[in-house]
């Protein structure tokens, strides 16, 4: 997939360890959360749902405490882990 998407900020997911509170704090000013883990994904509409911080940490963080990659935020949406459909929606990309 070739697209011209400019990055505002880029961090290496291996460079920082997070705990559950850190992961939950990243949801400040987020309305939509998509998390990919294995073959499944979870979607939270944070206007309607208030997930438990420990549950969010289990989804967003790997077993070593690193953030699952990629983690992409655009406006008030956060996508954690590679989830192509959410990225297409987020960036209004064509599937070609």
Image: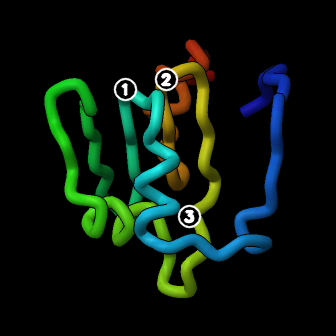
The location of residue 96, given as percent across then percent down, is: 62, 22
Task: Check the picture and name the quadrant holding the N terminus.
Answer: top right
Q: Which mark is residue 7?
A: none
Q: Is residue 38 visible?
A: no
Residue located 38% across and 38% down the image: 33
Q: Earlier in the sequence, mark 3 or mark 2?
A: 3
The location of residue 69, given as percent across then percent down, is: 62, 59
Residues marked 2 and 1 touching at CB (< 8 Å): yes
Q: Nearer the viewer, mark 3 or mark 2?
A: 2
Q: Which mark is residue 31?
A: 1
Q: Is residue 3 visible?
A: yes
State the residue lying farthest toward the left: 48
The location of residue 73, given as percent across then percent down, is: 60, 34
| Label 1 secondary element | loop
How far apart are the alpha carbons under marks 3 and 2?
19 Å
User: Would you say 74 lies left or right of 79 here?
Assistant: right
Indicate whether 23 appears above or below 79: below
User: Would you say 38 lies left or right of 70 here?
Assistant: left
Q: Which residue is mark 3?
A: 68
Residue located 64% across and 76% down the image: 17
Residue count near mark 2 (Cα–Cα under 10 Å), binned few <14, some 14–19, many ≥20? few
């Amino acid at each position: 997939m070739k697209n011209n998407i400019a990055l505002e900020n880029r961090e290496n997911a291996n460079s920082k360890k997070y705990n559950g509170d850190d992961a939950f704090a990243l949801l400040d000013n987020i309305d939509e959360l998509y998390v990919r883990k294995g073959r499944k994904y979870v979607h939270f509409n944070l206007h309607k749902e208030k997930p438990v911080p420990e549950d969010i940490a289990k989804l967003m963080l790997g077993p070593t405490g690193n953030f699952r990659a990629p983690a992409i935020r655009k406006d008030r949406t956060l996508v954690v882990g590679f989830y192509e459909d959410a990225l297409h929606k987020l960036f209004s990309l064509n599937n070609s």
